[in-house]
Image: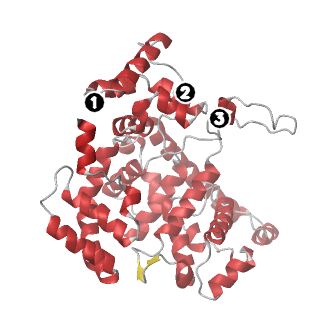
Amino acid sequence: MNESEQSNVTSAIAELLKDISSSVLQSVVETLNSLGVTSPEDFQYVQEADLLPVLRPIQARKLVSAWSQIKQSADSLSSSRESSSGTRSSSCSSSPSCGKASTVALDWADNFEIPWQKFPEALTQCLERKKRPSPRLRRDMVRIVVSEIMKVCDCPSKQSSTAIAKKMVAKYPASLQDVIEGDIVGSGYHSLVKQIQNRIENVKRLNVPKIRKRSRTEDSDTEEIPAERKAVVQDTYGCVNWDFKLMPLNETKESQLDKQERMKIKSKTTNADPEEVSNLLKATCFSQCKDINNGASIQQLCENWPFLFQEIGMCVHFKQLTGIDLKEMFLKSLDKKGQWLLNFLKTVGAEKKTKVQQTAAKLGVMRCQTEGCSEDLKDVVLLLLAYFDEKEEVMFHMWKTLALLKMWR
């Protein structure tokens, strides 16, 4: 199966199973490839048992059923056309919807017409004059394009978004291409694909739990408003466990308060056991989220949940919300991309900016003289600050040795 055929097969599956993850989708494509499927037309020969190793039974049945219906519809349509009269054929040819399949064409993205004529005049001027549009105009452009996309397909795949973004950048590269300091970044259209995908997700997100926003009236503008009514509208985007509906079975309101008090006491000591604190934070996550989602102020949260504003509390809370170990994920990403980024900053970055070159030379002298976290990590952070002209004192707390000695005494 070549790249084009694989893209068509992937899009067809994604259209039918809208909630399938990218990893499972890839496994399905690989399975079909091993079975000899080379195009969507071959779907009719796939059986439910062929898909069970990678899909749940219901998902497999959905695919097989949908492919069977498409084949039956195509056969019945072909038969009706053969038996139809000349008048009917003429009428059908003049109708834009006659004979249209119930599913979206697999190559719809390739034939998608970018609605250039619907763009605001200011945006059109920028594109034609090869100028970079402002963030506001760029967002308007994405909204218009996605609005037209959703009219054609209610669940576009990433491949479709990529094809459309690629066409847009190809027509106006000076205005839309991803460029930093004159260098094209990656494919040149990744950021536009990302914007289109994010907008599609926002449009599709219809039913999500929300905190009700206080209805504003003229008479109530001056009255004191409870904290929970001040909470802004939020949603579950990015979280796997945004709002804990129920308290853990082995917990009670009294036990939650008891653990909260224990953490308050431990936060005032310097030798608190990290593992014990971590367990207490996990056990009280229900109460923490309840306070946060009800609109408690930062000051109240800091007083009631002091560890929440320390490294251990942030990491535990982040994992409870997203299911991702923050430090582990960061270090994995650093292992994969850190050396590449470090080499880029020391070579390309140093050539473009004197400050980066000076920082790199300074770090080379100081290397192996520091203790603590990875030296590569320190170098990356400091070089990034130099590359983007950020001040170190804004990012770090500066402590004098004498001050530290006095504090510990």
The label nearer to you, 1 versus 3, is 1
Q: Earlier in the sequence, mark 2 or mark 1?
A: 1
- Residue type for callout 2: Lys
Classify the position of the C terminus by image quarter: top left
In the picture as drawn, the residue positioned furthest to the left comes out as: 368
Which label sits on residue 290? 2
* Residue ID at (34%, 80%): 353
Which label sits on residue 280? none
Q: Which residue is mark 3?
A: 211
Residue 267 in the image: above or below residue 328 = above
- Residue type for callout 3: Ile
Q: Horizontal and vertical percent for residue 73?
A: 62, 54
Task: Name the image quarter holding residue 144.
Answer: bottom right
Residue 324 in the image: above or below residue 272 = below
Classify the position of the N terminus by image quarter: bottom left
Q: Is residue 109 or residue 139 the one in the foreground?
A: 139
How far, Cα to Cα, is label 1 from label 3? Answer: 38 Å
Q: Is residue 118 or residue 374 the one in the foreground?
A: 374
The label nearer to you, 2 versus 3, is 2
Q: Which residue is mark 1?
A: 270
